[in-house]
Amino acid sequence: MLKFLAVLLCGLAAVPPAVLASESDNGLDFKYLYYWDRNGVWNHTPAFAYFRKIAANWKLQWDQEFDGVSGASRRLGLRNIGRLADNDLKLDGISGASKREIRHSEQATAAYANQGRNASASFYFSDENDYRSYSPSVSGSMDFNERNTTLSGAAAEFFDDLHPTGPFTGLGGKRNILSLTGSLAQIFTPLTLGAVTANVIHSSGRLGHPYNPVLTSQGTLLLENLPDRKTSVALSGQIIQGFHILDRLGSVRLDARYYRDDWQLVSGTADFQWYQYILENTYLRLRARGYRQGAAAFAKAAYEGNEVYRTPDIRYFDFSSLTLGLKIGSVFPESWGGSALLPDRWDISYDHGMTDTQGEEDGVRPAYHYQLFPNDEYYVQGTLMVGLSFDL
C-alpha cells in the first residue's frame, strides 16, 4: 500500500530519484522530451538512464542526454529542460547555457543504501559549442525514530566556462556555483508524510552572458553587466497525504517555496500535484504550479546607459507564471516480462506554462526582454515527455 507513496517521497531524499523510483535493481529508462515556446523556439531531448546493482547495497547509474535546439534559444524561465538539469524557474541554481544549438550532458552516480543509511556521489558534465559545465556532488541521508524520520543533506559545485563565438568572442568568462541543501522528512501517519528543506547557494564569476545586450532609452546597444557575486537562500516545505477512492490508492502533494537573494529578488512558488490510480496498474497525475517573483534591485524598464548594473533578461524582472500539467503512466502486459527487449512500463506527460510577460515585437524594441512575439500577447510554453522503462 505504501509503495506508491514511498516513490512520491523520493524527491525529498538525497539519493538520485531515478535510482530510488525504479521497481527493479537493474534497468534502463528512455525519455524523449519536446519543448516549444511562443518565441518560436523548439527543443528535442532524447535521454536514457542505465542503472545496475553491483553488490548487496550498491548501485551504479549513468544518465545520458542530448539537446537539439532551433536557432538562438531565447527561452523564458526554463533553463536546461532535460532530465539532468531541471531548473524550471529556479533563479538560484542556474548552470548551463541558454543559447545553444546542440548539447550533450552526462552524469555518473554511485549510490549506497543499507538499513536506512543512504549515500551517493555523482559527476555531471555538459558541453556545447560555447558553454561547458561540470559538477561533482555528494549526498547522504539517515533514518531514525524507528525509521519514521529522515535527515538528509547534499552539496554540489558547478564549474562553468562560457566561451561565446562570432561577434561575442572574448566576452565570456568562468562561473562557480556552490549549493548546500539540508532536509528533514517525517512520517506522521501511514498515509501522511512531510518535509522541510533549506538551500543556500553562492554564485560567483560571470553570472550573465553577452547574448543579453541592453537597449537604452536612446536606442543604443550596451553589454549586460551584472554583479559578480550572489548569495541566495530558499526554504521549502512539502506535505504528502495519501487516501483511497474506493479501492484505488491516491495522494495529493503540496510544495511551497520561498526564495530570497542579495540582489533583492524575492520569489514564491506553490506546486500542487494529485496522483490517482485509475486502474490497478495505471495512474494519473494532475499538476498546478504557481510562481511569483519581484524584480532584482537593478532591473529597470529602460536604462539611460550610466547605470553600474543593467540587464534586459526577464528572469530578473517581476513576473508571474502558471503551469498546468497532466501525466499518465502504466505497465505493459505481464506476458512481456519474459523478454528483455520489450519495455515494462510507460508514461507520457504534458506541461503547459503561461507567463504574464507580454511580447515586445513592436518594430522599435524587437529584442527587449527577449520577447519575440506581438506585444499584445503573453508568453506561453509547452513540454511533452514520453518515457519507457525496462527491467533488466
Image: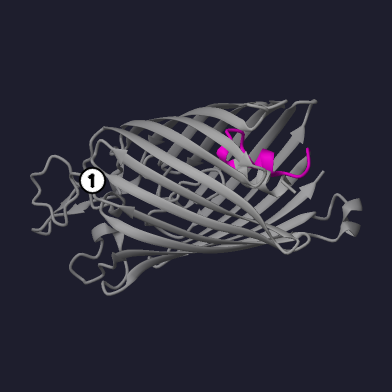
The answer to which quarter of the image holds residue 264 is: top left
- In the rendered image, is residue 109 in sight? yes
Q: Which residue is mark 1?
A: 296
Q: Which class describes the residues within 10 Å of circle 1: few (<14), some (14-19), or many (20+)? A: some
The residue at 44%/41% (across/down) is: 236
The residue furthest front is 189
Span shown in magenta: 11-25
Count up the numbered dots. Answer: 1
The residue at 72%/25% (across/down) is: 115
Pinpoint residue 68: horizontal percent, then vertical percent: 52, 55
Q: Where 330 sits versus 259, above or below? A: below
Question: In the image, 332: left or right of 105?
Answer: right
Pinpoint residue 146: horizontal percent, then vertical percent: 68, 27
> Where does the C terminus fall, quadrant-wise?
top right
Pinpoint residue 254: horizontal percent, then vertical percent: 50, 51
Q: Where 275 sits versus 38, above or below? A: above
Question: In the image, 16: left or right of 101?
Answer: right
The residue at 77%/59% (across/down) is: 281
Question: In the image, 187: left or right of 256?
Answer: right
Pinpoint residue 194: horizontal percent, then vertical percent: 55, 41
In magenta segment, residue 258? no
Q: What SS does tag 1 mark?
A: loop
The amino acid on which the numbered mark 1 sits, given as a three-letter code, is: Ala
